[in-house]
Image: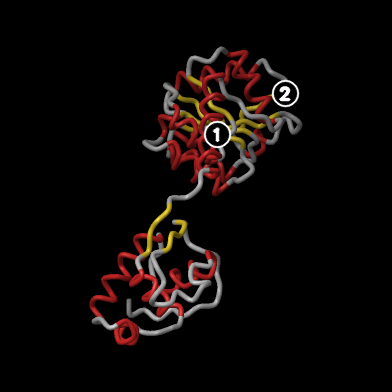
C-alpha cells in the first residue's frame, strides 16, 4: 500500500481539468503505468487522477477518487472477474477497461457480463488506447473483432437454449399418487397409508421425484405442480404415466411446506 499511496495525487491535483475524462490506472508494472501517463500527457481531454500497483490500492483509490474510467491490468489479481465485481460494488458507475496479456473466449464473455466496458491487450497502439478511453467514457463498448464475435456467439447460444423445449420426464402412477398427497398437505405417513406402502418407500419416491423435476423440497414440489398444472386432472391412483416438463423452481405461491420428506 505504501507504494500505491506514493502514486496517488492529492485530491486537489485530481480535481484539476474538471471537464476532462478522469482516468485511474491500476497496473502492477511500473513501465506500463509510466507509458500510459506519457501517452495521456499530450491529450487535453484526459487526466490521470491516480496510479496504483496492487489490487488493494485499486480498491482504495476507487473509493477515494472520482474517476470516470479505470484502466485495470489483469495481472493485479488471480481472478480478474472477482476483481471487477469487487470494484463495481464500490463504484457501480465506473467504466472499466481491462488490459490483458492474452484474450480467451470464455474470459472475454464472462468479463463483459460482469460489467467490463472494454477489453484491450497490452500491445495496443497508443492512439487506439486513447480512442478506447474516449469511446468507453462516452458509453460505448470496446472489443476487437474477435471479441465481438465471441460475445455474439455466446448470446446466440443462450437464446438457443431458451428457445429449446425443456427435457421431458416420465412420472409413474405411484409417483403421481405421492405427489398428489404432498400437494394436499399430507405427511409421509399419511401418504403411505393412502397408497398402501411404507413411510420409507414414500421418502424414497420423493427423492426420485425431486431429482426428476429439479426441485429441492415439498414446498417447491407443490409450487411446481401448481405452475405446470401437473395434477390438474386430479392424479387419481388409476391414472397412467404422465409426461411433464422438467424446469427450474416455480414462482412463489401459497402451499404446504411440511419438511418430513
Q: Which mark is residue 77?
A: none
Which residue sits furthest right? 19
Q: Residue 45 carries which label?
A: 2
Q: In this view, does 139 lie above or below 183?
A: above
Q: In this view, does 204 lie to the left or right of 94?
A: left
Number of labelled discs?
A: 2
Q: Which residue does the image show at 36% across and 76% down from the upper left?
A: 178
Q: What element carries label 1?
A: helix
- Label 1 crowd bin: few (<14), some (14–19), many (20+), radius 10 Å: few
Q: Which residue is disc 1 drawn over?
A: 156
Q: Is residue 125 left or right of residue 242?
A: right
> Where's residue 232, x and y in %?
53, 72
* Lower sequence index among marks 1 and 2: 2
Q: Is mark 2 on a helix, strand or loop?
A: loop
Q: In which quarter of the image is the N terminus?
A: top left
Q: Quadrant of the C terminus?
A: bottom left
Could you give the CA–CA distance between mark 1 and mark 2, rounded to whole angstroms? 38 Å
> Where's residue 172, x and y in %?
35, 66
Amino acid at each position: 500500500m505504501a507504494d500505491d499511496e506514493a502514486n496517488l495525487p492529492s485530491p486537489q491535483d485530481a480535481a484539476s481539468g474538471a471537464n476532462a475524462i478522469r482516468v485511474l490506472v491500476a497496473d502492477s508494472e511500473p513501465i506500463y503505468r509510466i507509458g500510459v501517463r506519457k501517452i495521456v500527457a499530450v491529450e487535453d481531454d484526459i487526466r490521470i487522477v491516480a496510479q496504483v500497483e496492487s489490487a488493494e490500492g485499486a480498491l482504495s483509490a476507487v473509493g477515494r477518487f472520482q474517476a470516470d474510467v479505470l484502466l485495470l491490468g489483469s495481472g493485479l489479481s488471480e481472478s480478474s472477474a472477482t476483481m471487477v465485481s469487487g470494484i463495481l460494488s464500490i463504484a457501480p458507475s465506473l467504466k472499466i477497461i481491462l488490459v490483458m496479456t492474452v484474450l480467451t473466449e470464455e474470459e472475454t464473455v464472462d468479463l463483459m457480463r460482469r460489467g467490463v466496458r472494454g477489453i484491450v491487450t497490452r500491445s495496443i497502439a497508443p492512439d487506439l488506447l486513447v480512442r478506447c478511453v474516449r469511446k468507453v467514457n462516452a458509453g460505448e463498448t470496446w472489443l476487437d473483432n474477435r471479441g465481438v464475435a465471441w460475445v455474439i456467439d455466446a448470446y446466440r447460444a443462450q437464446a438457443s437454449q431458451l428457445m429449446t423445449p425443456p427435457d421431458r420426464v416420465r412420472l409413474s402412477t405411484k409417483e403421481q399418487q405421492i405427489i398428489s398427497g404432498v400437494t394436499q398437505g399430507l405427511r409421509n405417513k399419511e401418504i403411505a397409508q393412502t397408497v398402501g406402502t411404507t413411510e420409507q418407500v414414500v421418502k424414497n419416491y420423493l427423492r426420485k421425484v425431486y431429482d426428476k423435476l429439479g426441485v429441492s423440497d415439498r414446498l417447491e414440489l407443490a409450487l411446481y405442480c401448481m405452475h405446470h398444472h401437473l395434477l390438474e386432472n386430479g392424479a387419481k391412483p388409476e391414472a397412467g404415466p404422465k409426461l411433464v416438463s422438467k424446469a427450474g423452481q416455480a414462482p412463489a405461491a401459497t402451499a404446504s411446506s411440511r419438511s418430513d420428506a
